[in-house]
Image (cartoon, rainbow, N blue to C red):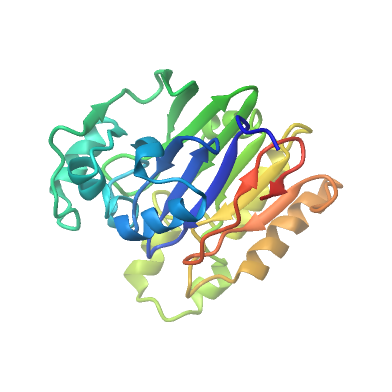
Amino acid sequence: MDENGLIFRCFASGSSGNCYYLGTRQRGILIDAGISARQIQKCLREMGLDFQNIMGVLVTHDHADHIRAVGTLGERVHLPIYTTAKIHEGIDRNYGVREKLRSSRRYFECGEEWELFGMKINTFHVEHDSTDCLGYCIDYLGQRFVLITDCGSYNDEMEAYIRTANHLVIEANHDEHMLLNGPYPTYLKERILSPRGHQSNDTCGELLERNWHPDLRNVWLCHLSLENNEPELAYNTVRSYLEEIEIIPGQDIFLKPLDRLTPSPVYELNDKVIEI
């Protein structure tokens, strides 16, 4: 095992909360903090890490399931909270964040490259009904990790980053048939299906079919709906699109749905993903 190699772990993924770790075995970053600080610390300690090993929190957008713990992490644990000025304004307005950010605020502009702990970080716009929403592209020691969550519709920039990713976390929120025939009220169904809502299994599969390339090694499906999706259904739908272009999950690519509440294994990101 490479002690300086890139590792990834999902702590939670879904409307109940989202949080991801990316880094090495010594230090790294969090992307989003939509679960409690206590849960995050527990997940870190299972990896032999703690908050002192975290160099910062990157925020995708200002919905509660992505920012619930940022106030605690920023002001009590003293982790820097990185996002755009517009998203910081949205965090300020969100009543789900009880501890308001003050000294821990850090700003960057969407589209500008910056660096944190040897990681080169780029961001791009994602369509979602939040104050703003970002996708992240993180380069480290020749590995490119891209995360795209909560996206109602795709754009050219998103597709361009998929075409250069080695490791991809991408939303497969719902099965459209389940959503349309499920218990949600009409207004909520319309919101999810809107161009600023959430991405379906089929849209995710189409994106991967159209933008797959030989260096895309690992794909995790994120933000699966509890009521309108099933992990096996999401996997099989996306798999069917990849098989249309003769890409076989488990052979040509690693494909895995992320659990909503149960932390994932720790993955070592190389040519072939390794569960640690």
Instruction: Reply above or below: 106 against 187.
Output: above
28 left or right of 251 in image? left
Residue at horizontal 19%, vertical 45%? Answer: 76
Q: Residue at x 41, y 61 (%)?
A: 192
Q: Is residue 89 visible?
A: yes
Quadrant assignment, res 159: top right
Any part of residue 36 in sight = no
Q: Position of residue 153 (x, y in %)?
A: 48, 46
Residue 141, x across and y down, in percent: 62, 22
Q: Is residue 39 above or below residue 151?
A: below
Residue at image point 68% right, 62% down: 235
Q: Quadrant of the N terminus?
A: top right
Q: Residue furthest front?
A: 48
Given residues 18 and 159, the one toward you in this image is: 18
User: 2 left or right of 181?
Assistant: right
Q: Where residue 51 sits in the image (x, y, percent)? A: 35, 43
Q: Position of residue 204 (x, y in %)?
A: 61, 51
**Total of numbered circles in the picture?**
0
Quarter-wise, where is residue 35 in the image?
A: bottom left
Horizontally, residue 92 falls left or right of residue 247, namely left
Between 223 and 29, the one nearer to me in the picture: 29
